[in-house]
Each structure stands twice: as structure tokens, then as C-alpha cells.
Image: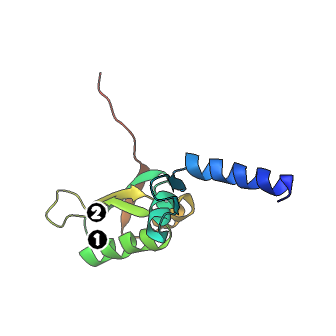
Amino acid sequence: MRPIIKAALLITTIVLTVLGLYRYSHATNSIVIPTTDQIARMNAESHDRYIVVFKEDASDDDITKYASQVESSGGKITHPYQPSGIMKTFSGHIPNNFVTTLEGASPIEYVEKDKIMTTQ
């Protein structure tokens, strides 16, 4: 094998190992490769977290529709809407390009980046 190919394979293996996408099992002498679902979950969780708050007159169907659109755009809902909850809201990892779509939607009051709040 050519030295350049060996170097490329070594670098790829190191990067994948650091990212947790590659693992070698010494017990079975086999390579463990993540499933498509595991990779999709890691990609979704790489997006920033946002809280999406809906207007009072938004229907449950509206909220479900937008939550589904977040997931179909590559995001992940981490705290789904609860019909018995105090507010009409959900939060999760949302791709930045989809945040602007949500901000322009009529049933949505506002979209805010999730962050830690403190008091003095």
C-alpha cells in the first residue's frame, strides 16, 4: 500500500475514533460502525438548541406540524409539546436555516436560542 494511502487511512481512523464513529474491538477483532440512526442523531444534536413558543390561538395540529418539519429538516425535538402544559411550546436542536422559516410562520410567537438563565 502506498504511503500516502496509509497516512490517509490513519488520519481518517483517528478522526472517526475521536468523534466516536469508529471503534475497534480487540476481543472480536472487528470494527464497530455506527448505525444510520446513530449518525443522524449525532448530526441533529450538533445544531444549536432553540425554544419555539406558539401564539395562544395556535392549534395542536400547528404545533405538531412544525415539530415534524424541524425533524424532517435534520433537527431533533428534545422537549416535545405537552397539550396539558402551561405554554404552547417545544424545544430542540434546530438547524439555523430552518430557524428563519419558523420565525416567519404565523402561528409562532417567537423563537429563542436556549441558554442558561441565572439570577443575582
Q: Amino acid at mark 2?
A: Pro
Q: Nearer the viewer, residue 19 or 112?
A: 19
Amino acid type of the residue that numbered disc 1 sits on in the rendered structure:
Ala
Quadrant position of residue 97: bottom right
Query: What percent of the width, then of the height, locates residue 23?
Result: 52, 54
Q: Nearer the viewer, mark 1 or mark 2?
A: 2
Left or right: where 101 falls relative to 119:
right
For the residue labelled by badge 2, is the local secondary structure a helix, a strand or a loop? Answer: loop
- Where in the figure is residue 16, as x and y percent of width and height? 60, 53
Q: Quadrant of residue 68?
A: bottom left
- Quadrant of the image containing the N terminus: bottom right
Which secondary structure, mark 1?
A: loop
User: Which residue is at a point 50% across and 70% down the rendered structure image?
Assistant: 73
Q: Disc 2 marks which residue?
A: 80
Number of labels in the image equals 2
Frontmost residue, 16 versus 28: 28
Decide: is 24 above or below 64.
above
Residue occupying the point 52% across, 61% down: 30
Give the Cα separation between the discs numbered 1 and 2: 15 Å
In the depicted view, which residue is nearer to us: 42 or 110? Answer: 42
Using the rendered image of the protein, determine whether residue 52 is visible from the camera's viewpoint. Answer: no
Residue that numbered label 1 is attached to: 58
